[in-house]
Each structure stands twice: as C-alpha cells, then as structure tokens.
Amino acid sequence: MFKNFREKHGGFFESKQSNASESDRGQDLSSILDRSQRGDLTVLVAEVAESMRVRILELYEHTNPKDDSPNRRSSLHPSPEADHDEDTPPLPLRPQGNGAAGIRGNPRRGSPRKQLSPQTKITVLSAFEDWRDSVLLRVGAVVNKDDDDQGGKEGQEELQDAAKSDDLPLDEDKDRIAKLQEIYHPVETPLAELPRATRLLILHSLLLLMLSLEHYSAYSRVLMLNVTSSLNIDINVLNQDEVSVARGLLQTALALSADQDTKEQPKRNDDMRKWKVGLASVAGAALIGLTGGLAAPLVAAGLGTVMGGLGLGATAAAGLLGTLAGSSVVVGGLFGAYGGRMTGRMMEKYAREVDDFAFIPIRGERRRNVKVKESAQENESVKEKESAKQDRRLRVTIGVTGWVKEESNFVIPWRVIGADTEVFGLRWEMEPLMNLGNAISALVTSAAWSVAGREVLARTFFHTIMSAVMLPLGLMKVAGVVDNPFSVAKARADKAGEVLADALINKAQGERPVTLIGYSLGSRLIFSCLQSLERRKAYGLIETVIMMGSPTPSDTEGWQKIRSVVSGRVVNVFSENDSVLAFLYRTSSLQLGVAGLQPVEGVPGVENLNVSEMISGHLRYQFLLGRILALTGLQDLDPSEIEREEAALASEDERLEKERLENEREAGVKDRESSAARDTLNSHEGFKEDARLQKKVEMRTQENMTAHRIEMLDMDDDDSSAPLFADPSKHSTL
C-alpha cells in the first residue's frame, strides 16, 4: 500500500537516533510507550491515512447513486418555529414514482454519474500521498528512537506512573464521543485500551508532530479527528489542546520578541518596522519576524503540558515540534495574515472584481468604536499583542452571510460558533446583499404573497418551478421587486467566491485548516470558491464545508468536484418547504436541481441534512444557525448565542407579521382567504403594490448604506476588519 513511500524512504524506519540528550530521555514517547505500543501508533496513523485515501478513491470509483453519508437519514422533529415564517406554505411533497418530473427539475437524480477525469484523480492522490508520506516519515522518526540507552532511563518510572492514570479532571461527554465516532469511524487499535492519561499524551504528541511539518493542513486536522475517535477521546479535548498550543506558540514568540526589542532598540529604523509589521500584522507588530529563531526549550515549555497537568519534557516537546520550535519565520507562516490585515489595503490585491470584500473577526480585542490616530499607534500595538495571545487559533472558520438588512448581519449570526476556532465573518458586496435582504422581506410581507396562500402555491408553485405554468399575475408583478436584486447578488456571489479562493490559495489564513459555513447566497459563494479551488488543484486547504439553503445546482458532477477539494465533511442542509428559494430560483438552471430544496445524491462523502420541519422559509436560516449547526454534529457552539438567536427570531416573526398586516391594509385586503382577494390576485392589475414595495426597498437600502458610509468616514477606517460594535438600539432584532 505504501510502495512509493518505501521506495523514497526505504531505510528510514530501520534507522536509530541515539543523539538525544538525557533530559529528553524519560520524557518523550519512548518513556510513555514500549516498543510494541509505538509500533501500534505507527500502524494507527498509517491505517487512518489509508482510510482517508480510500475515501478519495471512492469519489472517483463510486457507482451507487444513493447517498451514503452519515446523515443520510437525518430528519428533524417538528418544531414550534415551523408554524411561523413568512406565512407561506411548504412546497408539496415530492411526487413518488417515475411520473412526470418529479422533484422534478432534477432528471439526474439517481442516474449514473459522469466520471471525473483520470488526470484529476492522479493529481488529487498525488497531493494527498505527498502529505501522507511526510507524516509517516515524521512519526517514524519519533517512534523508532533507540530506547536501549540505560543512562536515559532515569526518571522514567515517575512519568510512566503518571501516564497510567485514569483519574483526570476532564469534562468528557459520552454523547460527544459517540457523535464523533459516528462521523469519523474509529480504527481498531490496542492503544484505545491504554489508560486515559497515556492516550492524552499520545494525542498531544501527535498534534505537535503534525505542527512540526511546518503546517497544519486540512489533511492533518482530519487525521487528528480520526485518531481522537480511535483513541476514544472527547473531541473537546482535542479542541482545547489546539487552543493551548496556539497560545503557547504565540505567547513565547511575544516574550522573545519583546526581549529582542529591548536589545535592539538603538538600531531600530523604518525599514525594520516595515519588516516586522509585514509579517506580524494584527498578531502584533513585534510578534514575528524579529529574531532569527525561538529558543526551543522556551517555546516547548508552554507546549509540553496536556490537560490535567500531564506533560512531556520541554526538550521532548521541542523535539516533537522540530523546526517550528526554533524558527519565528515558520511560526509566522503558520498563522499567516489572519488575525491581521485581511481587509482594507491588503485585500486590494484580491478584490479586483468586487466592490466590497473583508474578513471581520467575530471576537477579539479590536473594536471599531475607537478611532486610531497616529499618536495612538504605540498603544494600539500593545493591544494587538494582547489580542495575539488570546485570540489566535490553529483553525480558521469563515462564516458567509447570504443576505443582510443591516451591517451587523455579517457578524452577529456567526457568534454561535465557539472560541475553539478563529472565526471570521466575510463581509462581501454589502449594498447588493442589503438590497436583496430588503427585497425578500418586502416579498414575503406583500399582500400578493399572503393571499396566494397554501392552496394556490400548493397547486402552482411546484409546477411553476419546474415547468412553464404561470404563477398568479398579481404574484408575478410583485416578483419584479426581488428578481433583479437576486440576479445581481447571485452574480456577485460567483465573483466573490473566486476572490475567496484566491485569498486561500495565497495562504492568507496561513498554514491552517479552514472551515467554510454559509447560508443562502453565502452558500453559493462557497460553492464558487470550491469550484475555483478544484480548477486550480488547490487541495488540503479546506477541512469542512456546511452549506444551508444553497441556491446552487444539486447535480452530481458539480458536487463531485467540490467534494474533491474538501478533506473532511461536506454537508448540504436543505428544506423542501423553502418556497422563497424555489420562487427566487425559478428562472435558473432547474434541470440540474436546487441543492437548497433537495438532497445531493450519488456523491460519496456528501451528507444531506433535511431541515424541512424547522425551516419553513428562506429568512429563517439566519436565526436558526446554532440549532442547525448542532444537528450537523458541530460541537463547539455557544449556548447563550443560540438562545439569543431564538429570541431574535421571535422578534423578527412579530415584525414581519406587523408589516404584512400593514401591506394588506394598504392593498385593501380585508380577508386574505376571501374569493375577492383571490380574484384580485389573479387579475392583470394585481394589488398595485409593486411600485410601493420597490420604493420601500430602495429607501431602506439607502438609509442603511448612508449610515454605514458616515460611520466609516467618522472613524477614518481604511482597514475595516475590526468587529462591528454591537449596539442594541441600532440592531433591533439582533
């Protein structure tokens, strides 16, 4: 199975390294595990890597059109929210059998899929196998160390006794472990029977080994998740270990750079300052790029300790980290420009084709309500150093909003994601998205949409989406309010996806795995980004993708391509009751299906989550992100933010109902169920509300955009990457 690897590194595993110092002996894996157990660890890593390779091969050789994802049978229990929404009925149940067009609109459903090109398969496997070989080489270097040196056995007994403990103060949850093992199936290994402390030290050591490759790629993260599952360890333990390692790296780098600053103060000049800022950015102008190297014991001192007080020796941890323990440049490359100038001037090189594109930190020290002036630069640098110690993580999550009604919508919905990952909201094309958000709100509160009712939509909507049957004339007149904003925003999403792909390929996130989560047109932007990554053969960057209510095709071929660039999970969240999405997408390429309305089938590794009983309309996704992400198995969520979302949803429902009643009154509708109202709906004139609604949409968009521009001018904000200031009086529902 590893023929090529053996040819390249044939004599490696037979080599013995006997140059380790006595301080290293008795404090590394050779002290924790005997030779047989170290062999088991090598086998575990190799088998996990092989299972990952098999999943890649399945994508190119799979012939069963049925969905084989872990969530293929996912369904939700009815929820109280399902009775609210935009008061539009769900789409009719999908016709069964082989009759007429069934969900309809996706003739490819269940049909044999087109094979991807053999050359693509070779390229994907080559990228993966290069990573796999480097991992096995590095693991072999550690587990095959010579442990016959008697002088190095001093102090082993105490460490071995500590490593045999099962009495550790850990908050492990059996349900979380079960969910992790459902998604990442455990590999059988004798190591799973070892004491808890030993398993934790193995996991921690393996994390340091992954980092010693000078990157923490999406492949490495998926391997760590599989090993965590196989060792029967709670995913929260891995997440928290990643947080502590990130802090350890950056805190040590800051301490060393501060010491170097003191020594080199007389030699400072503008050129040196530019060098430091260029590499450090928000992580602290003096964080990285100052010294020629980081003292290995000092770096490792904060990185050898595992939860519960267990720890490797400082020298052993430094040995596991390899060059990362001695190079500030490598540390800088790991964390990249994220946490820094991924917006404003720096983004100009990426955002040539979009007017607005910025990464906004969801949490952290920086705030936009403070104007930074030249005289305050030094204080700001101190704040950014503190931010670096607290906010940097080994993983990056980017949340992509699909429509907005106020600027805060780019940030606040993503606060449900916890602090184990570094979370950014992607602000993109604010004005088109604001226009779209206001237009959708106008549509679903219009008299025409209310009067159309369950019966008419059940009779015509489904067929209209998939055929040329006409909608009621009154509804078609109102459609003009939303059709153009949706078309414009959809085109901008495709372009912004290319920009995002360019930023990721250029390692703006550093050498860290990226998770992409989006809803509505945010999902389309992610889809476009992944397509671009696939065309450019950029593998190993993306760990997980979750797309909700996607206005994208559900065809097998397109999803095969995006699946090939995602190392971990791809989750398609859809609702058959999303009449708004069906209405918006009715003029697109419906023969390829709509991913936000139906499952994606025939693509191995694509999970489908049906939230039809929770999502009864497109506007609800923004307010139910936390609950939906919990259903996908995402563990690191903020319960208080989920509660805030639900409260905001109740407030939004109340606001929409009030606006709906006002529109009905202005249209002269006294009873939306009356025959008179239905006759008006089907008449050529309709309710004559389209012009009024259009004016309202334009007015709301301009009001919010004007306020935003004034705020930007007041702050003289060239770099708009800081979090938006949460002002409850401004953001009424959020």
Image: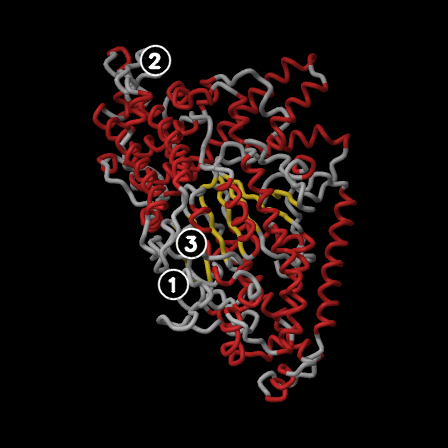
Q: Callout 1: few (<14), some (14-19), or many (20+) C-alpha neighbours within 10 Å?
A: some
- Residue at the image point whose x is 57% and y is 32% from the top: 388
Residue 622 sits in quarter: bottom right
- Give the number of the disc on residue 20: 2
- Residue at the image point whose x is 35% and y is 44% from the top: 172
How many angstroms separate mark 3 from mark 1 (CA)? 22 Å
Q: Secondary structure at mark 2?
A: loop
Where does the image place residue 441, in percent across and percent down from the top left? 63, 66
Q: Callout 3: few (<14), some (14-19), or many (20+) C-alpha neighbours within 10 Å?
A: many
In the displayed structure image, the side of residue 58 where residue 682 appears, left or right: right
Q: Secondary structure at mark 1?
A: loop
Figure check: 18 above or below 279: above
Residue 544 visible: yes
How many angstroms separate mark 2 from mark 1 (CA)? 55 Å
In the displayed structure image, the side of residue 240 where residue 141 appears, left or right: left
Mark 1 residue type: Ser
- Residue at the image point whose x is 42% and y is 63% from the top: 107
**Which residue is disc 1 drawn over?**
75
Where does the image place residue 429, in percent across and percent down from the top left? 66, 50
Q: Does label 2 or label 1 sit earlier along the sequence?
A: 2
How many angstroms separate mark 3 from mark 2 (CA)? 53 Å
Residue 716 sits in quarter: top right
Is the residue under label 1 in contact with that under label 2 (CB below 8 Å)? no
Residue 10 sits in quarter: top left
**Which residue is disc 3 drawn over?**
556
Q: Does label 3 or label 2 sit earlier along the sequence?
A: 2
Mark 2 residue type: Ala
- Residue at the image point whose x is 63% and y is 57% from the top: 404
Mark 3 residue type: Thr
Is the residue under label 2 in contact with that under label 3 (CB below 8 Å)? no
Where does the image place residue 177, in percent across and percent down from the top left? 33, 47
